[in-house]
């Protein structure tokens, strides 16, 4: 304690210090488990040695295409093997991985490509048309190089106008030396928010943060060696909650899945022995409500992690008898995914009734090991009591917090005000430190695990010539948890039907952002003219 390095020789050197990075996980797995399966997708099955070689070839091919350390490489892919390989191959050439939401419309993709400056895009053939439109709308003079990733397992063949991924890999050197970070604070990934205040913000992850977040999942969730994990969470969403980076560390196998359905999930659990997966509450509902012909008997307990919106206690209660052990987590894009986990204490909670067990598991939980602290902050920035009733903004500190927002220092400064990351979510904290969300700030709508900006939807609807005012709020939905509902005040003498307005919105927005219902009438307002959204939410609750 207090010894100085220059007095005792206790300095940092190559022998006792290496920058933290998840890249070492795949290098280690290839060295100690070369013949163990690491990546599976239908008949595509690769060992860790083969997984490492393919990631190496990708890194080499990208470098050969002119990608320099610090450049951005984007993906527009479902959860196919190439997407998992990119999590290692892209940073292995020193570049930054930008996984883009496959459900976005071309205008937003164009903005992301411009803002992030991607030099290369790996794209699924089915998304080539929307990518082409996005590139045409870009402000940059030099468009990114497009590499087409065919998916022959699903019968998705190349579009034909671009180099194909397997040919691109073949051009790479299997002996390419990975460019490891010289500083663990170097950037590894760029993830864009869902645009909860309009334009999406670019969230920058570090090698250190990605490594620590992955470790936090492993220890916090108690993940064992040699697990088999089903990649249900999109890899574009917080890098699949860090699972592509984590699994090689545990000798675990990633089972890719392109299209989500109850049948494909049950088949993977029964036929492949999948032991773990994660998913939004809509995925849990999918399993609970699956018809008998799609269900498969399970001979083992399946561990499930869920996040995105609080799952219904009834859904949690129905899953346990089916063989699923569900753990809820809470997090944001800015925190590499989850920062809290509803840890189960059998000694304390084991005697609870099934209904009480489900209610306990519906809480958002305690900090993951990679998080220093979670607190509630009042309006003046004071830390509020953990009494299970006082509401405040959830704020966190720790290694699972982003570096900041790309090219947006003002937003970064606001997010880190007072030395805390401000989540914008409102909740309570119980005396045992468990968080529980009680409301959402900024009018974010979380539909099927995807964040929707009410401001963005309102902006589109307000452009319709018949619309005077518009407010969009969350409407409960059995399938998606909640969906956008638009309340519209029309201009005098103007008329438009609900169907026509929804169709208009669909022409300008991604499908999941489009309102599923429209209500017409005068909107409730404060004396200063501000629309009172809480009254609109109340009207939906009261039917």
Image: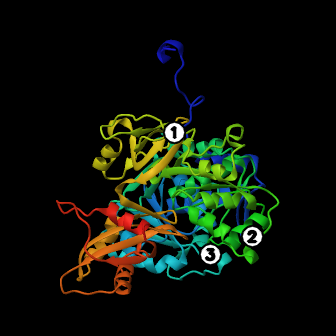
3 or 1: mark nearer the eye: 1
User: Pointers 3 and 1 in contact (CB under 8 A)?
Assistant: no
Residue beneath the point at 67% across and 46% down: 249
Is residue 141 at least partly visible in the picture?
A: no
Query: How many numbered markers are drawn?
Result: 3
Mark linked to residue 137: none
Would you call the spot at circle 2 few (<14 residues within 10 Å), some (14-19), or many (20 or more)?
Answer: some
Residue, far right: 299
Would you call the spot at circle 1 few (<14 residues within 10 Å), some (14-19), or many (20 or more)?
Answer: some
Mark linked to residue 151: 3
Give the percent coordinates (x, y) of residue 137: 33, 75
Using the image as rendered, state which of residue 100 and residue 186 is in the foreground: 100
Q: Is residue 142 left or right of residue 47?
A: left
Mark linked to residue 430: 1
Q: Is residue 290 left or right of residue 79?
A: right
User: Pointers 2 and 1 in contact (CB under 8 A)?
Assistant: no
Whole-Å distance between the Cαs marked 2 and 1? 39 Å
First in sequence, mark 2 or 3: give its number.
Answer: 3
Using the image as rendered, state which of residue 491 and residue 400 is in the foreground: 491
First in sequence, mark 2 or 1: give its number.
Answer: 2
First in sequence, mark 3 or 1: give its number.
Answer: 3
Give the percent coordinates (x, y) of residue 467: 24, 79
2 or 1: mark nearer the eye: 1
Residue beneath the point at 56% across and 54% down: 241
Using the image as rendered, state which of residue 445 and residue 7 is in the foreground: 445
Name the element at disc 3: loop
Dot 2 corresponds to which residue?
A: 267
Q: Quadrant of the C terminus?
A: bottom left
Give the percent coordinates (x, y) of residue 338: 53, 49
Name the element at disc 1: loop
């Amino acid at each position: 304690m207090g010894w100085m390095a220059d007095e005792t020789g206790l300095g940092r050197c190559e022998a006792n210090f290496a920058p933290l990075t998840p890249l070492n996980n795949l290098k280690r797995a290839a060295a100690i488990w070369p013949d163990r399966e690491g990546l599976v997708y239908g008949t595509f099955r690769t060992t860790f040695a083969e997984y490492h070689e393919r990631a190496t070839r990708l890194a080499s091919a990208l470098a050969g295409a002119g990608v320099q350390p610090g450049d951005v490489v984007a993906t527009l892919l479902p959860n196919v093997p190439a997407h998992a390989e990119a999590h290692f191959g892209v940073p292995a050439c020193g570049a930054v991985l930008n996984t883009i939401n496959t459900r976005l419309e071309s205008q937003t993709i164009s903005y992301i490509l411009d803002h992030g400056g991607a030099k290369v895009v790996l794209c699924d053939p089915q998304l080539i048309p929307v990518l082409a439109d996005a590139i045409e709308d870009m402000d940059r003079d030099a468009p990114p190089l497009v590499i087409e990733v065919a998916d022959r397992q699903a019968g998705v063949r190349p579009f034909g106008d671009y180099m194909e991924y397997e040919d691109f890999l073949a051009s790479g050197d299997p002996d390419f030396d990975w460019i490891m970070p010289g500083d663990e604070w170097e950037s590894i990934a760029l993830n864009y928010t869902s645009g909860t205040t309009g334009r999406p913000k670019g969230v920058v992850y570090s090698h250190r943060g990605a490594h620590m977040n992955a470790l936090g999942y492993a220890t916090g969730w108690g993940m064992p060696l040699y697990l088999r994990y089903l990649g249900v969470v999109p890899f574009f969403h917080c890098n699949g909650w860090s699972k592509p980076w984590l699994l090689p560390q545990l000798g675990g196998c990633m089972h890719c899945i392109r299209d989500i359905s109850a049948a494909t999930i049950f088949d993977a659990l029964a036929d492949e022995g999948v032991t773990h997966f994660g998913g939004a509450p809509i995925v849990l509902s999918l399993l609970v409500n699956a018809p008998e012909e799609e269900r498969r008997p399970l001979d083992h307990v399946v561990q499930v992690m869920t996040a995105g919106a609080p799952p219904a206690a009834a859904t949690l209660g129905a899953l346990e008898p089916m063989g699923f052990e569900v753990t809820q987590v809470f997090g944001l894009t800015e925190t590499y995914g989850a920062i809290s986990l509803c840890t189960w204490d059998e000694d304390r909670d084991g005697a609870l009734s099934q209904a009480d067990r489900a209610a306990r598991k519906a809480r958002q939980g305690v900090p993951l090991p990679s998080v220093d602290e979670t607190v509630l902050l009042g309006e003046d920035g004071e830390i509020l009591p953990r009494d299970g009733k006082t509401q405040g903004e959830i704020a966190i500190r720790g290694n699972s917090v982003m570096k900041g927002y790309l090219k947006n220092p003002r937003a970064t400064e606001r997010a880190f005000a007072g030395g805390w990351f401000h989540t914008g979510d409102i909740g309570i904290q119980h005396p045992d430190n468990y968080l529980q969300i009680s409301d959402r700030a900024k009018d974010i709508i979380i539909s099927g695990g995807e964040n929707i900006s009410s401001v963005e939807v309102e902006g589109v609807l307000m452009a319709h010539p018949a619309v005077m005012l518009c407010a969009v709020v969350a409407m409960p939905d059995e399938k998606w948890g909640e969906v956008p509902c638009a309340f519209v005040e029309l201009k005098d003498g103007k008329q438009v039907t609900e169907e026509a307005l929804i169709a208009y919105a669909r022409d300008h927005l991604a499908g999941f952002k489009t309102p599923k219902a429209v209500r017409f009438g005068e909107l409730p307002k404060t004396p200063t003219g501000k629309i009172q959204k809480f009254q609109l939410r109340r009207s939906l609750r009261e039917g």
